[in-house]
Image (tube, helix red, strand yellow):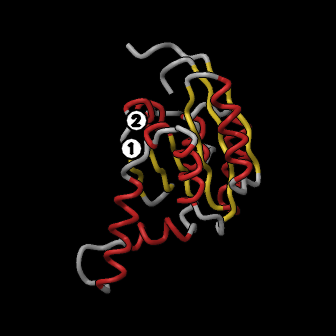
């Protein structure tokens, strides 16, 4: 991210309803533009996006995939390594598309580096993400809001929830 601030993140198993997690954050005043999701390509939600085609699919399936893509486009960013990404927020655009020279890391781990995780944490969480399913990241301007987001993420069924404190240079 391109500004001083904090972030909260949580790792969720595949069976957690991500719309419920986002709804809890929204009800607490967190905006969709401050939310980034990184999904395993095998996550049930991600599979629909990867299978989305123009024409040639069942009408109901096509409509469902279109709704999911529409939902993703409301967030600051959604990244599905090896499948694709949706980036709405300029701050997430800068963080996620900055070239990082870490060839030993998987795409998912490189994504996490862009969000401010250390190389070791990015590796660890990247491996978990393959097994677990989804990481929800919330960018916060103040550390007390990050603490609040961590609490909300835990209550929403996170397998792991923690915060990141960042001091970054302001965008030019």
In-front residue for pair 97/46: 46
**Mark 2–mark 1 CB contact (< 8 Å):** yes
Q: CA distance from mark 2 to mark 1?
A: 6 Å
Whether residue 90 sits left or right of residue 100 in the image: it is left
Q: Residue at x 65, y 31 (%)?
A: 146
Q: Which residue is mark 2?
A: 93
Whether residue 12 sits left or right of residue 137 in the image: it is right
Circle 2 Cα neighbour tier, 10 Å, few/some/many (<14 / 14–19 / ≥20): some
Farthest residue in the front direction? 27
- Residue 153: which numbered mark, if any? none
Q: Residue at x 66, y 23 (%)?
A: 143
Q: Residue at x 69, y 52 (%)?
A: 11
User: What kind of element bears circle 2?
Assistant: helix
Residue 111: x and y, percent?
Answer: 54, 42
In-front residue for pair 63/92: 63
Q: Quadrant of the C terminus?
A: top left
Q: Residue at x 54, y 46 (%)?
A: 27
User: What kind of element bears circle 1?
Assistant: strand
Q: Does 133 sit above or below residue 125?
A: below
Q: Earlier in the sequence, mark 2 or mark 1?
A: 1
Q: Does 141 sit above or below residue 36?
A: above
Residue 26: x and y, percent?
Answer: 52, 45
Q: Does 89 sit above or below residue 52?
A: above
Residue 7: x and y, percent?
Answer: 62, 32
Residue 124: x and y, percent?
Answer: 74, 46
- Residue 87: which numbered mark, if any? 1
């Amino acid at each position: 991210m391109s500004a001083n601030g904090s972030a909260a993140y949580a790792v969720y198993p595949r069976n957690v309803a991500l719309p419920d997690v986002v709804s809890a954050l929204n009800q607490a005043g967190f905006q969709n533009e401050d939310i980034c999701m990184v999904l395993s390509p095998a996550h049930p939600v991600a599979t629909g996006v990867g299978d989305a085609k123009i024409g040639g699919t069942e009408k109901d399936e096509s409509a469902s995939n279109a709704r999911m893509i529409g939902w993703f486009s409301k967030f600051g960013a959604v990244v599905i390594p090896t499948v694709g990404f949706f980036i709405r927020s300029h701050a997430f655009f800068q963080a996620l598309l900055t070239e990082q020279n870490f060839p030993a890391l998987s795409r998912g781990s490189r994504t996490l580096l862009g969000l401010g995780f250390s190389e070791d944490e990015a590796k660890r969480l990247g491996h978990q993400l393959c097994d677990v399913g989804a990481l929800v990241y919330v960018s916060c301007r103040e550390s007390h809001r990050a603490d609040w987001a961590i609490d909300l993420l835990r209550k929403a069924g996170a397998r792991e929830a923690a915060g990141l404190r960042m001091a970054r240079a302001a965008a030019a």
